[in-house]
């Protein structure tokens, strides 16, 4: 669908921005162009989240958001994820199937904040929510806990306007502590983690859940 917006700004699909049937080449100009678009999407959503963070501090004297991290997925990790998902190494599959090329993480003090933040995000004007994954109420087998939103964020360039996919992860400081360590130890490690270590990690995740519960009670 193509639609004219105000003036000469044209709504285009990200797929129309380049030759999507081309093979993904992480050293090409095309790849650089796409990564630029993802980086603009991150700026757009980061800006909104920072305003939310300041708004709660200034207007309500409440630290809703402790900090915000963001990243563009490394080219090698994009390729690796495409191979793992058995995708064709074409831009079309990369754009349509890899949801976390642009990733932003919102870290908050309390578990209840996660659900407030996700509602505020869903109400941001212009944002399209594509998918939600509640690993807070349903942690992964690994013990991983976080709330994920896959959304399309409006990106405006000088004469083009498009929706770009971003993955937003929302988690408490305690969940973040666990996930960062586990990620270093297991998720990205070349070495196989033993069953015993995996079990220890699951038991640590349970301690994190208890901690988050206690912090909520204390806060109440
Ligand atoms: P990295 O290095 O963080 O980028 P889908 O969106 O359904 O097509 P996907 O992307 O596998 O499939 O979804 P999922 O399982 O929700 O994972 C998305 C991201 O969540 C991961 O990205 C991690 O960042 C994080 N994540 C998921 N499971 C775990 C886990 O067990 N431990 C930790 N520490 N993080 C996890 P990547 O690309 O896998 O990794």
Image: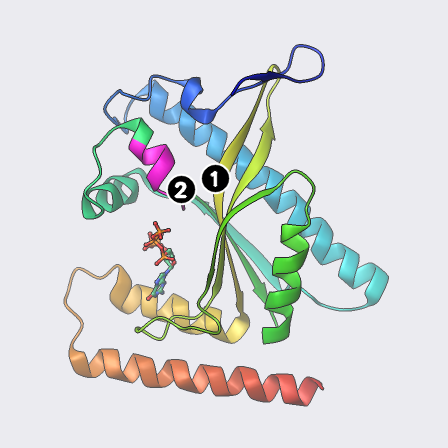
Q: Quadrant of residue 101?
A: top left
**Residue situated in front as seen by the camera: 38 or 86:** 86
* 150 magenta-colored: no
Q: Which residue is mark 1?
A: 165
- Residue at the spot 33% in from the left edge and 70% down from the top edge: 182
**Residue situated in front as seen by the camera: 135 or 70:** 135
Asked if residue 20 shows in the view, the reply is: yes
Secondary structure of the residue carrying tag 1 is strand
Residue 151 is marked as none
Secondary structure of the residue carrying tag 2 is loop
- Magenta: main secondary structure equals helix
Residue 101 is marked as 2
> Which percent across, then down, holds residue 22?
26, 20
**Residue situated in front as seen by the camera: 20 or 193:** 20
- Residue at the spot 50% in from the left edge and 34% down from the top edge: 164
Q: How is the image coloured?
A: rainbow
> Which percent across, then down, holds residue 2?
54, 17
Lateral position of residue 112 relative to residue 180, left or right:
right
Q: Quadrant of residue 217?
A: bottom right
- For label 2, being within 8 Å of ligand 1 is answered no
Tag 1–tag 2 contact (CB < 8 Å) = yes
- Residue at the spot 59% in from the left edge and 33% down from the top edge: 154
Disc number lying in front (1 or 2):
1
Q: Quadrant of residue 203?
A: bottom left
Residue 109 lies, with reference to residue 5, above or below; the image says below
Residue 148 lies, with reference to residue 111, above or below; the image says above
- Residue at the spot 14% in from the left edge and 68% down from the top edge: 192
> Which percent across, then down, holds residue 157?
59, 21
Mark 1 / mark 2, whichever is N-terminal: 2
Q: Quadrant of the C terminus?
A: bottom right
Asked if residue 110 shows in the view, the reply is: no
Please give the range of residues in magenta: 93-100
């Amino acid at each position: 669908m193509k639609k004219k917006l105000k003036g000469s700004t044209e709504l285009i699909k990200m797929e129309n921005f380049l030759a999507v049937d081309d093979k993904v080449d992480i050293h090409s100009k095309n790849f650089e162009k796409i990564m630029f678009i993802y980086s603009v999407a991150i700026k757009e959503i980061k800006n909104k989240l920072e305003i939310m963070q300041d708004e709660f501090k200034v207007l309500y004297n409440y630290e809703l958001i402790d900090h915000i991290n963001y990243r563009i997925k490394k080219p090698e990790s994009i390729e690796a994820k495409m191979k793992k998902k058995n995708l064709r190494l074409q831009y079309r599959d990369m754009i349509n199937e890899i949801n976390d090329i642009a990733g932003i993480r919102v870290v908050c003090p309390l578990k209840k904040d996660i659900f407030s933040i996700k509602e505020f995000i869903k109400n941001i004007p212009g944002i399209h929510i594509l998918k939600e994954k509640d690993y807070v109420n349903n942690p992964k087998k690994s013990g991983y806990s976080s709330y994920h939103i896959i959304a399309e964020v409006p990106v405006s360039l000088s004469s083009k306007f498009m929706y770009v996919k971003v993955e937003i992860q929302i988690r408490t400081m305690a969940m973040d502590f666990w996930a960062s360590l586990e990620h270093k130890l297991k998720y990205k490690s070349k070495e196989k983690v033993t069953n015993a270590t995996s079990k220890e990690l699951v038991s640590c995740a349970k301690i994190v859940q208890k901690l988050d519960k206690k912090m909520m009670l204390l806060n109440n």
